[in-house]
Amino acid sequence: MDDSSGPTDAEPDAKPSTNSDSNRDTHPGAKKKAPTRKTRDAPRRSESPAPQRSRKLRPAEAIREAREQLAELTGKPIESVSTFNATDDGWRLEVEVLELSRVPDTMSLLASYEVTLDDAGLLTGYRRLGRYERGRATSRNSG
């Protein structure tokens, strides 16, 4: 058997490859369709992505970006955002993350992370501030 003879029994729907979807008839005597005419007068749409925003993010956008990016990096679910401040360079947030789920839920282990974003909403850094059980109250000194 010759492997180059066309579709095999394992691939009954395989089609010979063509350079154009408009040329569906592939037998030797078939006439080829003329390519569609392109107008040169119409401006072409740019395929490049929209330019990045130069404005500072709104607070809700910054919170959304911080939650999404930290969850992606840590692979852990975000519980809440507990603090949020605008800075000269962007945003600083404190985010609560579920680090270890336990039964009962009050024994689950959470962690507080400090997250920094630039003006465009890109995460520039994060660090874990501490861990605690969900059911335990903690007090933290500011300063």
Image: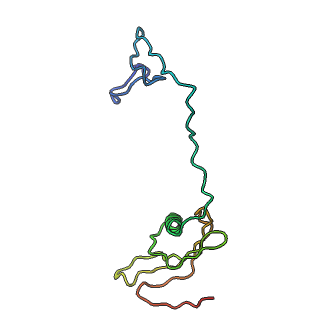
Point 55% across, 30% down: residue: 42
Residue 88 placement, left or right of 72: right
Point 44% across, 16% down: residue: 33
Point 37% across, 27% down: residue: 14
- Position of residue 123 measured from the top left corner of the image (x, y, whole percent): 59, 65
53 or 111: nearer the eye? 53
Most extreme residue toward the top, as rendered?
29
Q: Is residue 21 above or below residue 72?
A: above
Residue 36 placement, left or right of 122: left
Rendered-image quadrant of the N terminus = top left
Residue 142 placement, left or right of 131: right
The colour scheme applied to this rendered structure is: rainbow
- Position of residue 4 measured from the top left corner of the image (x, y, whole percent): 44, 21
Most extreme residue toward the front, as rendered?
41
Q: Is residue 97 above or below residue 5?
A: below
Rendered-image quadrant of the C terminus = bottom right
Report the label total: 0
- Position of residue 64 measured from the top left corner of the image (x, y, whole percent): 49, 66
Point 49% across, 77% down: residue: 96
Residue 136 placement, left or right of 69: left
Q: Is residue 13 above or below residue 108?
A: above
- Position of residue 32 measured from the top left corner of the image (x, y, whole percent): 44, 14
Q: Which image quadrant for residue 7?
A: top left
Q: Which image quadrant for residue 113?
A: bottom right
